[in-house]
Image (cartoon, coloured by chain):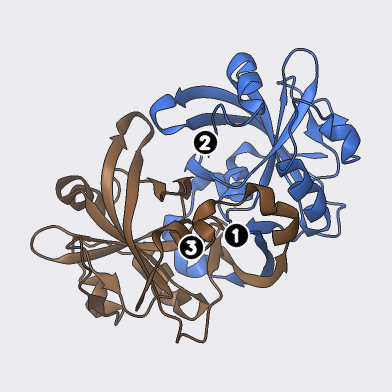
Chain colours: A brown, B blue
Amino acid sequence: MHQLKLGKAFTLMESGPVVLVTTHDGKSNNIMTISWTMVLDFTPLFAITTGKWNYSFAALRKSRECVIAIPTVDLLDQVVGIGTCSGADTDKFAKFRLTPIQGKFVKAPLIKECLANIECRVIDIVRKHNIVVLEGVAAYSNPARKEKRTIHAVGDGTFIVDGRKIDRRMMMASRLSPGLYG
Amino acid sequence: MHQLKLGKAFTLMESGPVVLVTTHDGKSNNIMTISWTMVLDFTPLFAITTGKWNYSFAALRKSRECVIAIPTVDLLDQVVGIGTCSGADTDKFAKFRLTPIQGKFVKAPLIKECLANIECRVIDIVRKHNIVVLEGVAAYSNPARKEKRTIHAVGDGTFIVDGRKIDRRMMMASRLSPGLYG
């Protein structure tokens, strides 16, 4: 994992990939699959929709930390599997053969097999709407990874894989975040 | 535009496409490009990140209505163009040759050229985080449209086009929204 500039971390999330969110509850690690996420600011700030229906929520609320890990299409079956069982009775790192790596700032682990990871602190929980607001404090990418295509959940059991990339940087130059330069 | 079951509308948003959000301020229509969005509930409820920096925000706050329109890759240059000029001095429907259609519930217009449209009411504005909470009240799709690939903004001036679709409905059957059946 190579450290990534924090000013670029929002670009890992903006396109809406399904992500894995890891937590550590003081005893053990857990992982949940989340596709209800958005960027709130370039700094970076993120929002995720979660609540008591996710076993990880208790750890998220208590520890006020997590890691957002970005999986790629070769990990799809693990991503779906993680989303359809519970940390209440499953060690998901073991079951899905994923490798936890210790980050620098939070106790929740990075996932070695993912394309990128973002260490996050919980800075607010908007209970009324089940929104958890996260601040990214460190980001990492795995440039050696050959498969870089992320996955987008449709919500009906199908998933869209990243297709081709189109460049409109010139057209958008006036509106891009300063964090993307230099 | 064919009416779509409301229980399926969240699937238009879950994969994180860049969207166009239309508003009507009592005098004229406007459009903004937004990629910071997420699903909050199947009912459907959505969150978008916006604030005073977007000219449309005043109309959104005042009218408490909008339409989320889902563009496809053939509309990319319009989507980028809409995101890099302001409704303060531009009639974006005219400039980008898009056709407003009157919806059933809100004064903000649907966009005829888009793949799908969702009429929305603003049900809350979380000022602290610049989050606008929207409830979808009607959804429409354009099944005659041949190009169905949506676009995902990366945030650095590049865009990812939908690639192939992978089916994991069997594996996820226990976790799918009841709104997707029947």
Question: Is residue B164 something one can see in this rendering?
Answer: no
- The answer to which quarter of the image holds residue B33 is top right
- Return the chain for callout 1: B
Q: Nearer the viewer, residue A130 or A163?
A: A163
Q: Are marks 2 and 1 on the same chain?
A: yes
- Going 44% across and 57% down the picture, which residue do you hit? A7
- Return the chain for callout 3: A
Dot 2 amino acid type = Thr
- Going 62% across and 31% down the picture, which residue do you hit? B54
SS type, badge 3: helix
Q: Which mark is residue A12?
A: 3
Q: Which mark is residue B122?
A: none
Q: Nearer the viewer, residue B43 or A34?
A: A34
SS type, badge 2: loop
Q: Nearer the viewer, mark 2 or mark 1?
A: 1
Dot 3 amino acid type = Leu
Number of residues whose C-alpha sits closer than 10 Å to that of mark 1, classed few (under 14), some (14–19) or many (20 or more) = many
Number of residues whose C-alpha sits closer than 10 Å to that of mark 3, classed few (under 14), some (14–19) or many (20 or more) = many
Dot 1 amino acid type = Asp
Q: Which residue is the extreme one toward the left? A: A27
Position of B136 relative to A166 (above/below): above
Q: Earlier in the sequence, mark 2 or mark 1?
A: 2
Q: Is residue A98 left or right of residue B132?
A: left
Task: Say which residue label 2 marks.
Answer: B43
Task: Say which residue label 1 marks.
Answer: B156
